[in-house]
Image (tube, grey):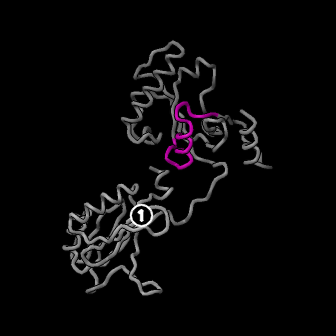
Amino acid sequence: MNQAAKDYWNQFWGEKERPALVSAWMFGEAADELAQSVIEGRKTATCSAYVLYELENESVPVIDEYSIILNSTEEPVAIIKTVDVAVIPMNEVTEEFALAEGDGSYRNWKEIHERYFKRELGKVGLEFTEDMLLVCERFELVDVKNKVEQPILLRVGTTNIPVSNVDRASQWYVEKLDAQLNYQDEDKAIINLADQSFFLVKAKENETANFFDAFGSERFSLTFEVNGEKSLKLLHDELSERDVKVGEIEKRGHAGINFVLSDIDGNLFDVWSELSPTYKRDR
C-alpha cells in the first residue's frame, strides 16, 4: 500500500479502531473508468482468475475485507468493503452477477473478460478455458475521497406544453420535429423529444408557454441545443422545408448562433448552436 493510500485510510477512520483486513489496488483494465463506475454505483462486483492467486501465493478475498481503490496514477479514490465471495467456473457466472460488474450486458461482460483473461494468463504461460475458476466478489461502497455532493435536483424530467388540440399537436411534433409519441388520450400526449419527456396538454384556446419580458417582447421558455453552427444551419433549412415557422438565424452577442421556431399552437422554442459542457463531457 502506497503512502497516499495509507494517509487516506488513516484519515477516514480517524480515532476509530481500524479493521485489520485492508488492501489497495486498481482494476486491471480501464482502471479510471471502472473506479468511476464504482463511485457512481454502477459497479458493485468484480472477478479475478483463481489460478493467479495460487501462482502469486496470495490469499483469496474474504467477506468484510476492505479495499482502497486506486486510479491509474495510483491515487486513492474510494474505499469498498467485500460483502460476498464465491469461486465459480466462468461459464456458470450468472447474468445478474455480470450486470453487477457494470459492463452493460452479459455478452459485453463475457467478451471483455475473455479477452482480458486470455492476455493475463498468456503472460504466465497458461491457456484460457471457459470453465476456468473465477473469484467473484460483491462489494459495497464505503467512502469516496474528496466526494462532491450531488445537487438535490438532478435533471429536468417532464416539460408541459399547452396545446389546443392534442391529436393535431402530437402529429405536428412527430412529423415536423421527429418526436416519438409514447402515449395519447383526449387530454394529453406524451412525446420524447431531444431525449426529454414532454406532455402536450390540452389547454384553453390561445394559451401558450410564452411570456412577455419587462420590455414587452414575447419570449420563449425553452432552448434546444445542437452540435455546432453547421448543424444549426442545416436544421434551420430542413425545418423551413417542412413548413415549420422559423425565425432568422441570429448572433446575440454570446458564443454561437440561434434561431426561434414556433409550433402549431404558437409555442416558441429557441435553438442554439452550442452544447452545454456537461453534455459534451457525458457523451
Compared with residue 167, is residue 25 higher up or lower down, i.e. above or below?
A: above
Rendered location of residue 88, percent (x, y): 46, 28
Give the residue pinned by disc 1: 257
Compared with residue 77, is residue 2 higher up or lower down, i.e. above or below?
A: above
Check if residue 139 falls in the magenta segment.
no
The residue lying at 42 percent from left, 87 percent from top is 216
* Farthest residue, direction right: 15
* Farthest residue, direction top: 125
Q: Secondary structure at mark 1?
A: loop
Compared with residue 271, is residue 146 higher up or lower down, i.e. above or below?
A: above
Say whether residue 210 is left or right of residue 19: left
The residue lying at 24 percent from left, 65 percent from top is 240
The quadrant of the image that shows the N terminus is top right
Label 1 environment density (alpha carbons within 10 Å; few <14, some 14–19, many ≥20): some
The residue lying at 57 percent from left, 47 percent from top is 39
Residue type at the position of mark 1: Ile
Tell me where residue 226 sits by quadrant. Answer: bottom left
Rendered location of residue 208, percent (x, y): 32, 81
Q: Is residue 178 visible?
A: no
Check if residue 35 falls in the magenta segment.
yes
Front-lying residue, 39 or 48: 39
Tell me which segment is drawn in magenta.
Answer: 25-44
Q: Is residue 224 visible?
A: yes
